[in-house]
């Protein structure tokens, strides 16, 4: 599904990503864990085309998408829910969720995609007519993920989906992610806190100073002392 190979990204003369490689396959939940500033968001934004890679390749379903514009990558089936949520405040919840159905045509109708988004986050049904500026942080995060899902993506990127949210709302977000994983898409999550990694994650990568220092199962992440110090520091 997704293969990132030896990705190098330079920002203002500094190497932010140093040969990052990772994979996410259909039906998998893969987590990228690292401290703030380690390179997680840069990795996601480079996959989405918002950052230019100095070298390396980003391959989606066997096709190189490195350097494509963000709208082209979205049209190829990559959905993105950024850390800041970036819900459109002047649009209602319903309009935010419907927006991707106008920009990408798939075998699912707009109505089917909208229904799926509300099935994953049923709490949003009661807020359909509410403006984006009237939502709590957790509600905005739900809308952001639901909007990315309404793109009908093959790959879904979720940047820190539970960071900074009330503990009362986190279970609803995690349940929604579990439901999305069962749909068969590849899901790639960035987290700065190892304790926020869902129990049902299939694989985990640890990034430190722009380099992948661990790739394996969540159960094995603390077997390497150096990696354990990083993830415990991130937590």
Image (cartoon, helix red, strand yellow):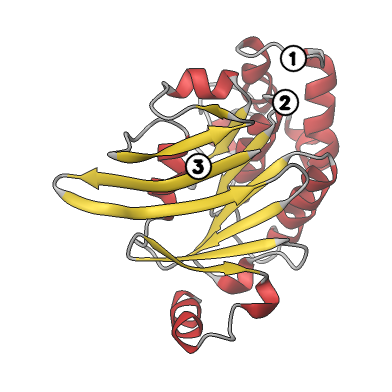
Give the numbered dot on residue 82: 3
> Does residue 140 appear in the picture of this structure?
no
- Nearest to the observer: residue 209 or residue 162: 209
Q: How many marks?
A: 3
Secondary structure type for disc 3? loop
Residue lying at 73% horizontally and 27% vertically, measured from the top left: 128
**Do the residues bearing badges 1 and 3 touch, measured as CB atoms within 8 Å?**
no
Q: Quadrant of residue 101?
A: top right
Residue lying at 38% horizontally and 32% vertically, measured from the top left: 50
Q: Is residue 221 above or below residue 44?
A: below
Secondary structure type for disc 1? loop
**Do the residues bearing badges 2 and 1 touch, measured as CB atoms within 8 Å?**
yes
User: Closer to the camera: disc 1 or disc 3?
Assistant: 1
Q: Is residue 183 above or below residue 67?
A: below
Residue lying at 64% horizontally and 47% vertically, measured from the top left: 24
* Residue hosting label 2: 152
> Does residue 122 appear in the picture of this structure?
yes
Q: Quadrant of residue 78?
A: top right
Report how far apart the C-alphas of labels 2 and 3 lie in the structure: 17 Å
Identify the mark nearer the N-term, 1 or 3. 3
In the image as oriented, which residue stretches furthest toward the bottom? 225
* Residue hosting label 1: 106
Could you tell whether 217 is left or right of 22 in the image? Answer: right
Instruction: Give x and y (percent) for residue 204.
Output: 61, 64
Residue lying at 52% horizontally and 24% vertically, measured from the top left: 73
């Amino acid at each position: 599904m997704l293969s990132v190979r030896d990705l190098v990204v330079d920002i203002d003369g500094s190497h932010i990503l140093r040969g990052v490689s990772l994979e996410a396959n259909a039906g998998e939940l893969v987590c990228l864990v690292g401290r703030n500033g380690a390179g997680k968001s840069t990795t996601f934004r480079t996959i989405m085309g918002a950052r230019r890679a100095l070298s390396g390749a980003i391959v989606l379903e066997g096709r190189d998408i490195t350097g494509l514009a963000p709208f082209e990558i979205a049209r190829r089936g990559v959905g993105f829910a950024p850390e800041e949520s970036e819900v459109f405040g002047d649009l209602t919840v319903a309009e935010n969720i419907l927006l991707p159905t106008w920009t990408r045509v798939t075998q699912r109708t707009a109505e089917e995609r909208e229904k799926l988004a509300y099935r994953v986050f049923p709490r949003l049904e009661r807020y359909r007519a509410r403006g984006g500026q009237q939502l709590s942080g957790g509600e905005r995060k739900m809308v952001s993920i639901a909007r990315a899902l309404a793109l009908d993506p093959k790959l879904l990127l979720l940047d820190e989906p539970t960071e900074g949210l009330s503990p009362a709302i986190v279970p609803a977000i995690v349940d929604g992610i579990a439901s999305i994983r069962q749909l068969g898409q590849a899901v790639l999550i960035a987290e700065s806190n190892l304790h926020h990694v869902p129990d049902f994650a299939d694989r985990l990568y640890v990034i430190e100073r722009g380099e992948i220092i661990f790739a394996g199962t969540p159960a094995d992440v603390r077997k390497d002392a150096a990696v354990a110090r990083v993830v415990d520091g991130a937590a």
